[in-house]
């Protein structure tokens, strides 16, 4: 699960390392990360726990499940979490990571 969370965090532009992600997932402390980035990693962990522990992975994919997962991931960051976006999505931060060699 740590590997998936780390890779998702990198796609979202979270400034983390694999080691820091692993520490956060296991309830440990990290240094040199913003509270927002830590919260994003925790939200990704909560979403994976929801999917795996509540048997959601065996449910047929539907809009309500996807909205619930999005709501968990965006908790504390978006007042419209769990709903369709009404603005375009940008991948600028992903390209920035690629040029830095991350």
Image (cartoon, rainbow, N blue to C red):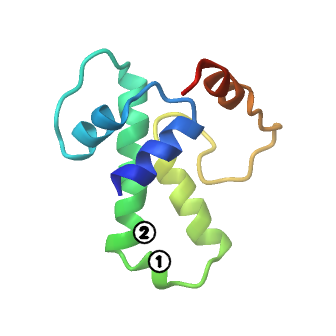
* Residue 55 found in image quarter: bottom left
71 sits to left or right of 23: right
Quadrant for residue 87, please give it.
top right
Q: Is residue 68 visible?
A: yes
Q: Is residue 48 above or below residue 19?
A: below
Residue 74 visible? The answer is no
Query: Total marks drawn?
Result: 2
Q: Which residue in the rendered view is the most extreme toward the front? A: 101
Identify which residue is drawn at 56% across, 30% down.
Answer: 13
Q: Which mark is residue 101?
A: none
Q: Nearer the viewer, residue 17 or 57?
A: 17
Relative to 56, is 25 above or below? above
State the image coordinates of residue 2 (x, y, percent, origin top left): 34, 51
Question: SS of the residue at dot 2?
Answer: helix
Q: Which residue does the image show at 77% across and 33% down from the upper left?
A: 90
Residue placed under numbered mark 1 in the picture: 57
List the single residue furthest toward the left.
Answer: 28
Marks 2/1: CA–CA distance: 5 Å
Q: Say which residue appears at 52% left-offset and 36% top-offset.
A: 10
Residue at the spot x=18%, y=29% of the render?
29
Res. 51 mark: 2
Residue 20: percent from left, percent from top: 29, 32
| Front-lying residue, 72 or 58 | 58
Q: Quadrant of the N terminus?
A: bottom left
Q: Are marks 2 and 1 in contact (CB under 8 Å)?
A: yes
Whichever of callouts 2 and 1 sits on the residue coming sooner in the sequence is: 2
């Amino acid at each position: 699960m740590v590997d998936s969370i780390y890779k998702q965090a990198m796609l979202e532009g979270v400034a983390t390392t694999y080691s820091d992600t692993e520490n956060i997932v296991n309830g440990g402390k990290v240094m040199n990360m913003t509270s927002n980035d830590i919260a994003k990693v925790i939200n990704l962990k909560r979403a994976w726990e929801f999917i795996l522990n509540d048997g959601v992975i065996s449910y047929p994919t539907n809009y309500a499940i996807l909205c619930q997962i999005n709501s968990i991931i965006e908790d504390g960051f978006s007042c419209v979490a769990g709903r369709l976006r009404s603005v375009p999505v940008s991948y600028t931060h992903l390209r920035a990571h690629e040029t830095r060699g991350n």
